[in-house]
């Protein structure tokens, strides 16, 4: 099953995000879940990171929530909102 994790940063957290990007990437490289794609959400000008997006494969929501909770950015309380949804992949 596919799942989308959509996280938006709290205001004024750009420096915190940048200071911890290497830890976040290192976590993703451990392959704690099957990542289909992921990357930062950007502002409309494409200049500033404003959140994170993940498309993952997992059997249960619990697996997805565990993956998200173990992310170093989660531990930093960087995200103001985290939305997790099942995704029915039809094309691609």
Image: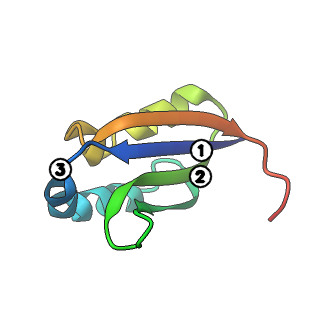
Disc 2 residue crowd, few under 14, some 14–19, many 20+, Cα 10 Å = many
Disc 3 or disc 2, which is closer to the eye?
3
Q: CA distance from mark 1 to mark 2?
A: 5 Å
Q: CA distance from mark 3 to mark 1?
A: 25 Å
Q: Say if mark 3 contacts mark 1, CB within 8 Å.
A: no
> Which label was assigned to residue 55?
2
17 on left or right of 8:
left
Q: Is residue 13 above or below residue 83?
A: below
Disc 1 residue crowd, few under 14, some 14–19, many 20+, Cα 10 Å = many
Q: CA distance from mark 3 to mark 2?
A: 26 Å
Residue shown at 84% from the left, 60% from the top: 91
Instruction: Name the quarter where the N terminus is drawn.
Output: top right
Q: Quadrant of residue 59?
A: top right
77 on left or right of 68:
left
- State the SS at label 1: strand
Residue shown at 45% from the left, 48% from the top: 32
Residue 3 spot, x, y in % from top left: 63, 42
Residue 56 spot, x, y in % from top left: 59, 49
- Mark with earlier residue (1, 2): 1
Q: Which residue is mark 3?
A: 12
31 on left or right of 14:
right
- Mark with earlier residue (3, 1): 1
- State the SS at label 2: strand
Q: Which residue is mark 1?
A: 4
The figure's colour scheme reads rainbow
Q: Quadrant of residue 18?
A: bottom left
Disc 3 residue crowd, few under 14, some 14–19, many 20+, Cα 10 Å = few
91 on left or right of 17:
right
Q: Nearer the viewer, residue 69 or 7?
A: 7
- State the SS at label 3: loop
Q: Is residue 22 above or below residue 51?
A: below
Instruction: Name the quarter where the C terminus is drawn.
Output: bottom right
């Amino acid at each position: 099953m596919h799942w989308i994790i959509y996280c938006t940063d709290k205001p004024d957290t750009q420096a915190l995000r940048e200071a911890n990007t290497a830890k976040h990437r290192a976590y993703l490289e451990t392959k704690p879940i099957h990542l289909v794609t992921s990357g930062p959400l950007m502002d409309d000008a494409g200049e500033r990171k404003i959140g994170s997006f993940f498309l993952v494969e997992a059997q249960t929501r619990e697996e997805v929530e565990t993956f998200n909770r173990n992310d170093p950015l989660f531990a930093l309380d960087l995200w103001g909102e985290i939305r997790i949804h099942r995704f029915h992949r039809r094309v691609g």
